[in-house]
Image: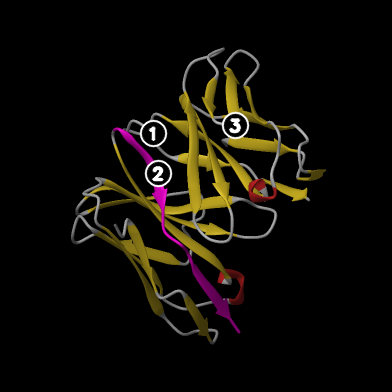
Amino acid sequence: NAGVTQTPKFRVLKTGQSMTLLCAQDMNHEYMYWYRQDPGMGLRLIHYSVGEGTTAKGEVPDGYNVSRLKKQNFLLGLESAAPSQTSVYFCASSSRDQPQHFGDGTRLSIL
Amino acid sequence: EDKVVQSPLSLVVHEGDTVTLNCSYEVTNFRSLLWYKQEKKAPTFLFMLTSSGIEKKSGRLSSILDKKELFSILNITATQTGDSAVYLCAGGNAGGTSYGKLTFGQGTILTVHP
């Protein structure tokens, strides 16, 4: 009964380092999303995917890349981390008849 | 640019009170309005509304959508301390999926004191 699993849960990076956040879902959902949540700003969409091998930009895509090589996984990459990317990152998945279901988030701090 | 605005941003009440949370939206190709509850971690789904004037209920929670005035409300009656959370409203567009891309509001922080 895992649902959406995000790895890692916490991470501290130095400015300029790179890292990849992993999202895995076991509900066979077609659609997957990456959001960031900052105080007072709700959830903002970074990138999303409507199927394996396809991705699209959301509201705040700059500084991030994504890949969806397998239907169940959606990876979010930071090539050169900046302090402005300090945030809580949420992954979500959905299907045509299910609302978006969220993971527990990854808290990322960039020093 | 799509926009969702929630009010109030925070609310403090006592157990047993009734609260009303507001959400106004401007979403291109609007399809649905969703409410989520966020405690410490993942937002959890409460309601999805697509038609005006039809109330959805789940226990002490209810919600309604007005597509003419572009707003929705979430009511919580007989509040309990377990209702303390951030309540998020989101507008969904067509976007090629049934729910499409969601634009979230800032959230309303509800605190219920015993």
Task: State whether residue B45 is above or below residue B28.
Answer: below
Counting other residues with Cα less than 10 Å from the Cα at mark 1, is it few (<14), some (14-19), or many (20 or more)? Answer: many
**How far across and down, in percent of the image, does residue B12 sit?**
81, 46
User: Which residue is rendered at x = 53% and y = 74% of the image?
Assistant: A108
Q: For marks 3 and 2, give the CA distance.
A: 20 Å
Residue at mark 2: A100
> In the image, what residue occupies the spot 25% across and 46% down?
A29
Alpha-carbon distance for marks 3 and 1? Answer: 22 Å
Task: Name the one closer to the observer, B47 or A51.
Answer: B47
**x and y percentages locating residue B43 in the rendered image:** 51, 51
Q: Give the mark toward the camera: 1 or 2.
A: 2
Between marks 3 and 1 in the image, the one whose residue lies nearer the viewer: 3
Give the magenta part as a residue range.
A97-111
Instruction: Give the CA distance from mark 1 to mark 2.
Output: 8 Å
Give the mark, 3 or 1, whose residue is nearer the N terminus.
3
- Tell me the quarter of the picture where residue B39 sits: bottom right
Hey, what amino acid is under mark 1?
A: Tyr
Residue bearing the label numbered 3: B61
Q: Please determine whether, in this image, residue B20 is positioned above or below residue A84.
A: above
Q: Residues within 10 Å of mark 2 (few under 14, many from 20)?
A: many
